[in-house]
Image: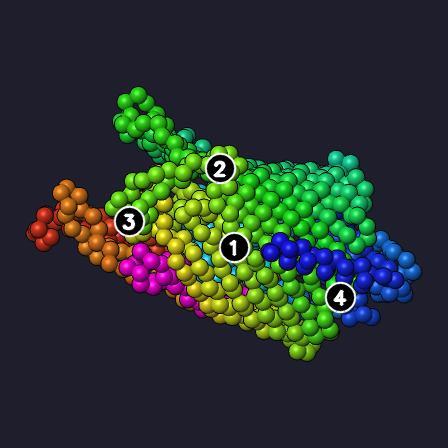
Amino acid sequence: MIRSFSLSFAVFFLISVVALGQEKVTLNGYVRDVSNGEELIGVTVYIPKMSAGTVTNPYGFYSLTLPKGTYEIQFSYVGYAPQIVTVDLQGDVERNVDMLSETTVMQEVTVTDKRVDENVVSLQMSKNTLDMNRVRKLPALFGEVDIIKNIQMLPGVISAGEGTSTFYVRGGSADQNLILIDEAPIYDPSHLFGLFSVFNADVIKDSELYKGGIPSRFGGRLSSILEVRTKDGNNKKLGVTAGIGTMASRLMVEGPLVKDKASFIVSARRSYVDLFLRAANNDNLVHFYDINAKVNWKYNNNNRFFLAFYNGRDVFNFANQFGFAWGNRTATFRWNHLFNERLFSNTSVILSNFDYKLELKDPVQGLKWTSNLEELSVKEDLSYFINTNNDLTFGYHITGRRFSPGKIVPNSEASMFEELSLDHMYALDHGIYVSNQQRVSDRVTLDYGLRLSIFQNMGPSDVYLYNDPQNRTQPDPVDTLHYKAWKSVKTFVNLEPRLAARYMLQDGQSIKVSYNRMVQNTHLIASGTVPVPFNTWNPSGYYLNPQIADQVAAGYFQNFKDNMLEFSAEAYYKKMKDVTDFADNADIFFNKNLSTEFRQGKSWSYGLELMLNKKEGRFTGSASYTWSKTMRKIPGVNQGVEFPANYDRRNVVNLQGAYDYSDRWTFGATFTYSTGRPITIPEGKYQYGTYNPDIVTERNGYRLPAFHRLDLSATYSPKKNETRKWKGTWVFAIYNAYNRQNPFTVYTRVTQNKDGDITGDGYTKETRMVYLFPILPSVTYNIKF
């Protein structure tokens, strides 16, 4: 029934394509940066005569189907000089457009001061695109520009605090964010516990965060999509960019393999704290590295091929007592094919691997623990540009995953541990989608679509059966079900409708609404509220249902002072069911009976987001405020009573600003404030033999103090020496400028009671707060050839 409905839905659209596309001509092409040949994503292509237009897709392609005639086409993009191109359409025309950055002056290009108001007229809401040129002017920890830190400053996004790259979006947990680099998933975006993220700003071309109104082509997570695309490489000339920082250095090289036809880019980054420590004979060694690489080949205007790689790793070694490491590796092959002037195809084959390991080096208690998650995806995404009023997208995705939750190997013959391995788990994830963006009138635009999610938990697998899987006092299984390879253990089928609408009130004002249902079939098995690399993932299956979220959002958008100021106000409500948690005092470390620890329940979140943005002028910046509330109610957790999620921060204020004082000096500042997050603190203890367990009466019953921090930066660009080919800039930054001691976490410890035996056993338990970063100055020198 579901497959029949989806097929009929697609056939209806395809019939519409044929009917609406008759007796028209088409203008299509690519929009590129004239200096390096990079395709530009999201360029507005507007036709004043028709009061209609489109935007370039994620691959820089646009297509407009129009009646025959002569048209003025306006191309506009943030950071680039707008252009007007006159085209006589008597038949199909291919017109590629090269755009200039605003710092470049070329007399032969016509420039207009009219700029399309994307903030108001675009259909998409709950979406933020990061302008990398603007981000580079803001303060950065140790001089490393980090898009994750900037995403944590957006309305509706909550930071977990210092020491982590984790973020939470509109009441969703950290594992409910899908993070993509060149379409490949990243499962842990942190370097050095969040001091850096896996995204090297030098190589980033474009990044977008979807918080709501999520397009049908995305699936697999409940709360957000962070899509990051790397540069393709300069196909005009060789270029080198380098940076020497306080804790890490980086190098990027790009250039043509065949001018205007093929190019490459390679970027590497490494920290060197471990080198200093080794020189000082310190056994505590910590470092990270990451490498990005990409090649692309334009066979002709109808076929282009891309091959992209990422490899990043963190390694910690403490006094030769214990160590741990984690890393992400991805590879993406893409083929862009233009069937005709209206039908565009992107075919992708994607590999991703996330792994971690822990090693204890004690002769008796020594062990090596390894775990990983591997996946292979094949995606086919198609765009059919019907006419100026209808853009159709549809496609099919399939992903195979292998979950390896853990393997223990003793590291010596004297070790008390025996070799043990948890069973691998396998899954197939299918997604079929179709959507249409329709301009109903000058005031009304719609985007409606449907995604069909089919998830199969596959064999080989052994499923343990219990008399009562919720009864942790009798965890041993009573029977086992055996499934052979490729045999379906459990299949889940879900429909995910998507809808977005925009209504223009008048020039410079609009109202937008959206609804989306999201389904997630992978579950994070985490050991605590602060992300550490010892997390595993489980698929939906015999004891785990898919997590499902429904979100509605509405917003008001208005621009002021000739589009210099952008204002938005959005309210949302999100309801989630079968969210995954664990019973109080759960044992999730290498537990073969982990199914007895699972608990699933419901969660809900609602909030208001306000933002004021200034993109033009010598001073640019933004101010945002978020009020939100996130609650959970899960049987078997907190005695079944609702409780706030550990990322429930009611009030968040973020301020960002950059001022171009002169051609040589730019100053930047960021300030963030948020109410403290909830935390669970034991209220006492009891004695059971020699064991003194905690007494926890309420989940997340306390809150940490408020979090706030000010960061400052100054960028100095010396006057360029005309006799040399390179240019250098100095970046001076101060992290935590007024030395705020922001709480990272709280822990309890038992100490001997010197003033008397108050507890009856000579010991007392005290609570201590952990702080991470004091005021941290840094200097970075950047070089560009």
Identity, as a three-letter code, of the amino acid under mark 4: Asn
Give the quarter of the figure containing the N terminus.
Answer: bottom right
Which label's residue is closer to the chain start, 1 or 3?
A: 3
In the orientation shown, which residue stands out farthest toward the front? 1
In the orientation shown, which residue stands out farthest toward the top? 413
Disc 3, SS: loop
User: What residue sits 29% from the left and 25% below the top?
Assistant: 415
Marks 3/4: CA distance? 58 Å
Is the residue marked by circle 2 packed among few (<14), some (14-19), or many (20+) residues within 10 Å?
many
Marks 2/1: CA distance? 22 Å
Q: Which mark is residue 389?
A: 4
Could you tell me residue 233's position as x and y percent?
Answer: 69, 42
Q: On the rendered structure, is 296 left or right of 584?
A: right
Q: On the rendered structure, is 729 left or right of 273?
A: right
Q: Which mark is residue 459?
A: 2
In the orientation shown, which residue stands out farthest toward the right? 90
Is the residue marked by circle 4 packed among few (<14), some (14-19), or many (20+) residues within 10 Å?
many
Residue at numbered disc 1: 519
Residue at numbered disc 3: 471
Give yes or no for contact between labels 2 and 1 (Cβ–Cβ under 8 Å): no
Disc 1, SS: strand
**Is 632 colored magenta in this rendering?**
yes
Marks 2/3: CA distance? 26 Å
Which label's residue is closer to the chain start, 2 or 3?
A: 2
Front position among marks 2 and 4: 2
Give yes or no for contact between labels 2 and 4 (Cβ–Cβ under 8 Å): no
Marks 4/1: CA distance? 30 Å
